[in-house]
Image (cartoon, rainbow, N blue to C red):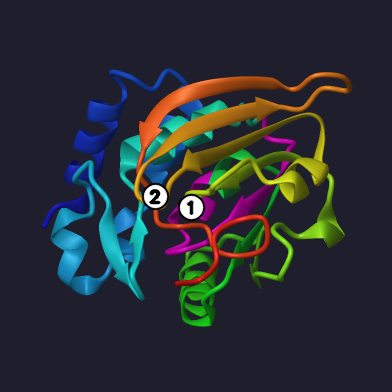
Amino acid sequence: MDFEAARAGLIEHLSSEIRDKRVLAAMARIPRERFVLPESQQFAYDDRPLPIGLDQTISQPFIIALMTEALELTGSDKVLEIGTGSGYQAAILAELARSVITTERLPALAEKARGVLDSLGYTNVAVHLAEETLGWQGEAPYNAIIVTAGAPRVAVDLLAQLAIGGRLVIPVGSRYVQELYKITKRKKKNIVENLGGCRFVSLVGKDAWEEE
């Protein structure tokens, strides 16, 4: 399969709705086929989520691009990702930010993602096993936080780790369907924007869902 041609086709498809050319350029540089299961590689550039094992998924490219665009990264940001999964989103962030801290609660996924990211030469990404409290408090504050799993509410612990002026992008709703919110932190009143409907696996942990 010609992955480069398929990748170019996906980027062209996304460009009709994603305005940030830097996000599209980052996605054009990353081999998504490296982040999916071998049996799914032929579908790596379809605009849809794919299973990555352990009941987890790699998100739909459009949603990934939309969430990344909403972070408004400048190249000098420190970014926190909640839910490493395959590592694909972390790779995109690494292309656009100064440093990326990403947490994953499943050790097997964390190890695999770390291996792929290392093999691709990303030296500005740190993959950690998730702690009981959401986020990674030791590196706070962050200029941007992205949550790649559906939460029942906007997590207070994550807002506390966000710098003033920072952006939090998080899916909020039920276990089965959510709305994608962007919260910009202000000293007095945060700015909240609804970016539309989405569907993610459940965010598990304190200030989120209990594990089923």
Residue type, label 1: Ala
- Image vertical order of residue 25 relative to residue 90, above or below: above
Residue at image coords 28%, 18%: 16
- In the rendered image, which quarter is residue 131 located in? bottom right
Left or right, 202 with respect to 138, comes to left
x%, y% of residue 95? 56, 44
The reply to whether dot 1 and dot 2 touch (C-beta < 8 Å) is yes
89 within the magenta span: yes
x%, y% of residue 159? 76, 41
Q: Which residue is mark 2?
A: 200
Residue closer to the observer: 210 or 93: 210
Q: Which residues are magenta?
A: 74-92
Give the crowd class for mark 1: few <14, some 14-19, many >=20 residues within 10 Å: many
Give the crowd class for mark 2: few <14, some 14-19, many >=20 residues within 10 Å: many
Element type where label 1 sits in the image: loop
Residue closer to the observer: 145 or 37: 145
Q: Farthest right residue? A: 187
First-in-chain label (1 vs 2): 1
- In the rendered view of the protein, which quadrant contains the C terminus? bottom left
Residue closer to the observer: 199 or 114: 199
- In the rendered view of the protein, which quadrant contains the N terminus? bottom left
Residue at image coords 24%, 27%: 12
Q: Which residue is mark 1?
A: 149
Residue at image coords 41%, 41%: 64
Give the spatial CA distance, label 1 vs label 2: 5 Å
- Image vertical order of residue 83 relative to residue 187, above or below: below
x%, y% of residue 163? 83, 36
